[in-house]
Amino acid sequence: MIVLRRVYDGVADHFKIRASEWVMLWPAFGLWFVLQLDPDMFTTSPSFAVLADWGEESTWAWFLFGCGLARLLALTINGTFRGFVFSPHIRATASLIGAAVWSQVSLGFLMAWLTAGGAPSGVIGWSTMVLLEIVNTHRSWADVGKQGLDAG
């Protein structure tokens, strides 16, 4: 019970300043979940044509789950262990993983728009995730060396 309280308090204390990182759990776990519900989702729209060429829905689902899990672990470590000096490094790594995954999704949507009749709106939506992850990476690296001060 004490461990759960410590995790909760740490997360709650840092949630506001890490909100954009917490928000990035939604697309990762959300898309993983809908790919579990609809394992044939890529056949529903030409916007998914290139992603389908690169891998099956189940493969993409596990990449997304890994992306979300990396983020969740990084944020839990960040909030729970204040003195852990590598917390910003772990958060930055999670953000870089996110940027890598979302850049591939964005590229797939861009290529599908250019070659397969996909919708250009997907390019804007998914590339927004890449931009958020770049900001998150910058913020994480800016926290390096601040443990014991006000970051953590």
Image (cartoon, helix red, strand yellow):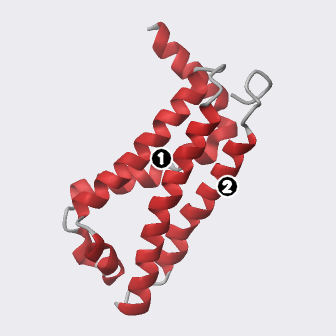
Residue 21 vs 109, above or below: the answer is above
Q: Which residue is mark 2?
A: 135
Q: Are marks 1 and 2 in contact (CB under 8 Å)?
A: no
Furthest-top residue in view? 2
SS label for mark 2: helix
Residue in front for this viewpoint, 146 or 40: 146
Rendering coords of residue 138 (x, y %): 70, 51
In the image shown, does 71 or 141 lie closer to the viewer? 141
Query: In the rendered image, which residue does mark 1 sit on?
Result: 25
Q: Is residue 5 above or below residue 113?
A: above
Give residue 18's quadrant in the image: top right
Residue located 44% across and 68% down the image: 104
Instruction: Specify which label sits upstream in the sequence, 1 or 2.
Output: 1
CA–CA distance in space, label 1 to label 2: 15 Å
Q: Residue at x 75, y 43 (%)?
A: 142
Q: Residue visible at 49% across and 67% down?
A: 103
